[in-house]
Amino acid sequence: MKDEYHFTNAEQGKFYRPMDELEMPIYLDDEIKAFFWKKMDSGSFSLNEIIKAPLKKDIEVSKKLAP
């Protein structure tokens, strides 16, 4: 490391992005990926749409079960 750093031209928050703008990488098990790839091959939907659908249904069920 340097003995001294100069921040005279620094810009605070230059690389800041709110959490809701960040894309969250999600890693799926091979079995789950294979299931969704097979499902995608049988239709004209995108992988993104096919994976979102059961997640949205799960959220709906969770909301109904929650007090």
Image (cartoon, rainbow, N blue to C red):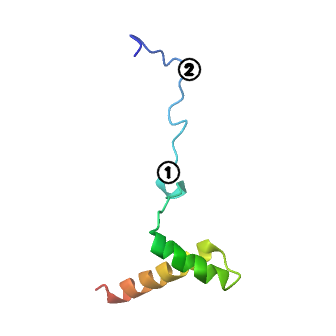
Q: Is residue 2 above or below residue 36?
A: above
Which of 44/42 is in front? Answer: 42
Return the residue at label 1.
18
Q: Residues within 10 Å of mark 2 (few under 14, many from 20)?
A: few
Give the class, few, some or many, for how many residues have Cα within 10 Å of label 1's Cα (few <14, many ≥20): few
Where does label 2 land, which residue? 9
Q: Is residue 25 or residue 63 the one in the foreground?
A: 25
Q: CA distance from mark 1 to mark 2?
A: 23 Å
Q: Position of residue 22 (x, y in %)?
A: 52, 54
- Give the residue furthest to the top: 3
| Residue displayed at 61% across by 76% down | 49
Is residue 52 at least partly visible in the picture?
no
Residue 36 visible in the picture: yes
At x 52%, y 72%, the residue is 33
Dot 1: element? loop
Disc 1 marks a residue whose amino acid type is Pro
Q: Residue furthest left?
A: 67
Quadrant showing the C terminus: bottom left
Residue 44 figure quarter: bottom right
Q: Quadrant of the N terminus?
A: top left
Q: Position of residue 63 (x, y in %)?
A: 38, 84
x then y, percent, for residue 14: 55, 35
Q: Quadrant of residue 50?
A: bottom right
Tag 2: residue type?
Asn
**Residue 36, percent across and down?**
55, 78
Q: Residue drawn 47% across and 54% down?
A: 19
Residue farthest to the right?
Answer: 44
Direction from residue 2 to residue 41 in the image, left or right = right
Mark 1 and 2 residues: CB-CB less than 8 Å, in contact?
no
**Of pointers 1 and 2, the one earlier in the residue sequence:** 2
